[in-house]
Image: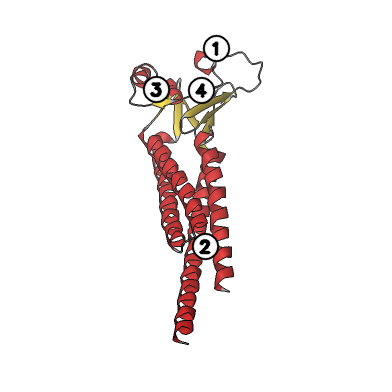
Amino acid sequence: MASRGKVCCLGLSSTLAVFSLILLTVCIFSASFRYNSDSLGGVKNYGLFRFCYTPETQSQTRDDDSNSKTCHLRNYINSAYCQDRSNSNHEKSTRNCFGDFELATIILISASMGCCILAICFSICTIFTSFGALAHSVVLIAAAICSLSGFLAYTYYYELKDNQYELVIGYQYQIHYGWAYYVFGFSSLLQWISFTCSLFGSAFVLVHKNKKRQSKVTSTSL
């Protein structure tokens, strides 16, 4: 019973960790954490380090040079390139540059992904040693804490009043959260569920180990 419970719990925990890893990978490379519309009816999508512009129609002519690139990578705000941009045009600088909170989110997502990979490896190691189950739980809670911290940091920054709108030529455009933001939150939830399952798995491993030890002691005494 304990052996079967161990396999089920660790199997479920590892499966959820894999799903979470896939979702985090999609999120970190997406350009859909935030979006807003412009006066031409196009949509501007902001990722952690990507920017994409989708015009209202593909054949639409655009006077704004900065929209000539449909998608491009953004630079860190403290780079020389971004310093020049921020001095000339704030609206253009947000398209081409990402800030400290986004950098922190990238680092925390990357750490969470690394912990997920380790958790999967340790769950495989459980076949050979019971230490693998404990290590699996430890790195999973580290992954969950990293992803939740990244989600809360990103949310906190963009819930500030100054970051909820974009000012373009005297007009305010409200910025909304994109699908990647919600997928990020869901992947963090999956990691916490995965960690909970891993705790049950670790408990079953310890029970199974104790039963083995007791059976050894009994056979030795006989």
What numbered label is drawn on residue 63?
A: 1
Label 3 element class: helix
Percent position of residue 170, x then y: 44, 22
Distance (Cα) linking label 1 and label 3: 18 Å
Distance (Cα) linking label 1 and label 2: 55 Å
With 63 as the anchor, is 81 left or right in this view?
A: left
Percent position of residue 84, x then y: 34, 17
Name the residue rendered at 44%, 86% in the picture. Answer: 221
What numbered label is drawn on residue 90?
A: 3
The quadrant holding residue 180 is top right
| Identity, as a three-letter code, of the amino acid under mark 4 | His
With 40 as the anchor, is 159 left or right in this view?
A: left
Residue pointed to by mark 4: 72
Q: Is residue 189 visible?
A: no
- Numbered disc in front, either 3 or 2: 2
Mark 1 Cα within 10 Å, few/some/many (few <14, many 20+)? few
Vertical comparison of 179 with 41: above or below:
below
Distance (Cα) linking label 1 and label 4: 19 Å
- Numbered disc in front, either 1 or 4: 4
Distance (Cα) linking label 3 and label 2: 47 Å
Vertical comparison of 4 with 90: above or below:
below
Percent position of residue 4, x then y: 59, 69
Q: Label 4 near label 2: C-beta < 8 Å?
A: no
| Identity, as a three-letter code, of the amino acid under mark 3 | His
- Lower position in the chain sequence, tag 3 or tag 4: 4
Name the outermost residue toward the bottom: 222
Residue pointed to by mark 2: 197
Mark 3 Cα within 10 Å, few/some/many (few <14, many 20+)? some
